[in-house]
Image: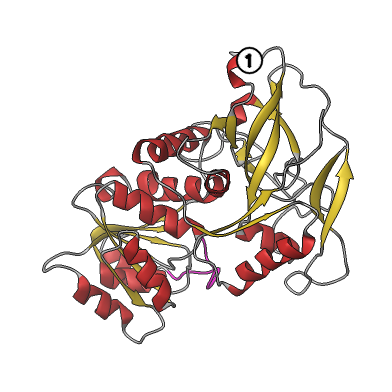
């Protein structure tokens, strides 16, 4: 038997309900068949989607699938058809956070769309459990320079940030000589974009409502930043740029008035990449943006190929995901895990929140 974290059903309307966490004992995976491997997970990271699931604000909510999208662990069993089977045994791996999207540049090839690990009826697996059975094609060897907590912090936000910067903003806007604005620094995706862009030689500027987060972003390589709660913050941001420099791209997770601000900040033909709309689910497309030839590009997650690209870049540049806090405990520690959710709910974190498991005794 093995332990796993679920949410339990209670009465309440979407957005008002807050489903409690539940520790359950589930059957251990059977011996793997074909190309399956069994991963003994050592760490799992939280994402905002986990919070949205608890609030019933995410599609496909279910109470029968473990939570968790991000995970790192060691392969303890492998099916007979796993290529180089002996090489995989004992390997520390990172789990690909979703399926249904192999390599197409525009979006998932699978008619069912992209299905993300954890907490929904769309994919029956999650990473907040001790043992995970999964196809070997859905794991990548973890970079040696990362701790278990750092490796677990990387998948979803790293993949989303990589696609947003490199494939959506585009190569010419994300290389040496480019200038990029990353809004809302402190969240996992924004920090991943910052780290990737700095490693690619981009001049990066940031916004936040926290002076402390602006300071920490500067330590990670940001050229400057402004508090977006300050009146006329876009003018202050422009004043930070070298003479005659403008932004080539803006990577935004807020929505709202992003297009209005982008018209003032982007070069003609610049790109606004939107990976979320935490401020507002609607963004008016202004005529000024049309006249300035601004591209607005939506993006979410990424393909299996982009996941491998991202990990190769992390390995090459020895990038370490920013981890806000690690809870070194076991899955039994529901109070500790709830406290991590509380930090995310209040927006106090700078980087990822990770549960690093105490050694599990479960065996196949």
Report the residue that reaches farthest toward the left: 243
- Residue at 44% over, 68% down: 184
Please say whether residue 73 is visible from this viewpoint: yes
> Relative to residue 102, is residue 214 drawn left or right?
left
x then y, percent, for residue 11: 88, 70
Instruction: Quadrant for residue 36, please give it.
Output: top right
x then y, percent, for residue 244: 12, 66
The quarter of the picture where the N terminus appears is top right
The quarter of the picture where the C terminus appears is top right
Majority secondary structure of magenta residues:
loop
Where is 182 relative to 66, above or below?
below
Please say whether residue 83 is visible from this viewpoint: no
Residue on which disc 1 sits: 85
Q: Quick check: is 290 in the magenta stretch? A: no
- Residue at 51% over, 40% down: 107
| Element on which disc 1 rests | helix
> Relative to residue 85, is residue 274 drawn left or right?
left
x then y, percent, for residue 247: 25, 62
x then y, percent, for residue 294: 30, 60
Write the start and end of the magenta stretch as one range: 276-284
């Amino acid at each position: 038997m093995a332990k796993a974290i679920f949410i339990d059903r209670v009465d309440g309307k979407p957005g008002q309900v807050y489903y409690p966490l539940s520790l359950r004992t589930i059957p251990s995976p059977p011996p793997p068949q074909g190309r399956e491997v069994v991963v003994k997970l050592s760490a799992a990271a939280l994402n905002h989607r986990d919070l949205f699931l608890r609030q019933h604000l995410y599609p496909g909510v279910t109470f029968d699938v473990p939570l968790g999208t991000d995970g790192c662990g060691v392969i303890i069993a492998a099916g007979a058809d796993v290529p180089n089977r002996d090489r995989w045994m004992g390997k520390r791996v990172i789990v690909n956070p979703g399926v249904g999207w192999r390599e197409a540049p525009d979006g998932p090839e699978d008619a069912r769309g992209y299905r993300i690990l954890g907490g929904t009826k769309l994919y029956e697996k999650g990473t907040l459990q001790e043992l995970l059975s999964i196809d070997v094609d859905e794991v990548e060897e973890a970079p040696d320079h990362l701790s278990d907590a750092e490796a677990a912090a990387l998948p979803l936000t790293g993949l989303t940030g990589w696609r947003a910067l490199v494939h959506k903003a585009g190569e010419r806007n994300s290389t040496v000589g480019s200038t990029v604005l990353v809004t809302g620094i402190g969240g996992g995706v924004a920090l991943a974009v910052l780290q990737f862009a700095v490693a690619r030689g981009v001049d990066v500027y940031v916004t936040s409502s926290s002076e402390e987060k602006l300071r920490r972003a500067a330590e990670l390589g940001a050229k400057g930043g402004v508090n977006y709660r300050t009146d006329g913050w876009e003018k202050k941001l422009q004043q930070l740029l070298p003479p005659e420099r403008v932004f080539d791209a803006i990577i935004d997770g807020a929505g709202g008035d992003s297009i209005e601000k982008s018209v003032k900040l982007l070069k003609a033909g610049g790109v606004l990449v939107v990976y979320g709309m935490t401020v507002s689910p609607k963004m008016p497309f202004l005529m000024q943006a049309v006249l300035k030839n601004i591209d607005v590009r939506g993006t979410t997650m990424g393909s299996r190929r982009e996941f491998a690209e991202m990990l190769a870049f992390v390995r090459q540049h020895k990038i370490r995901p920013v981890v806000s806090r690690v809870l070194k405990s076991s899955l039994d520690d529901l109070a500790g895990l709830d406290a991590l959710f509380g930090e995310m709910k209040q927006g106090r974190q700078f980087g990822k929140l990770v549960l690093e498991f105490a050694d599990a005794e479960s065996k196949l």
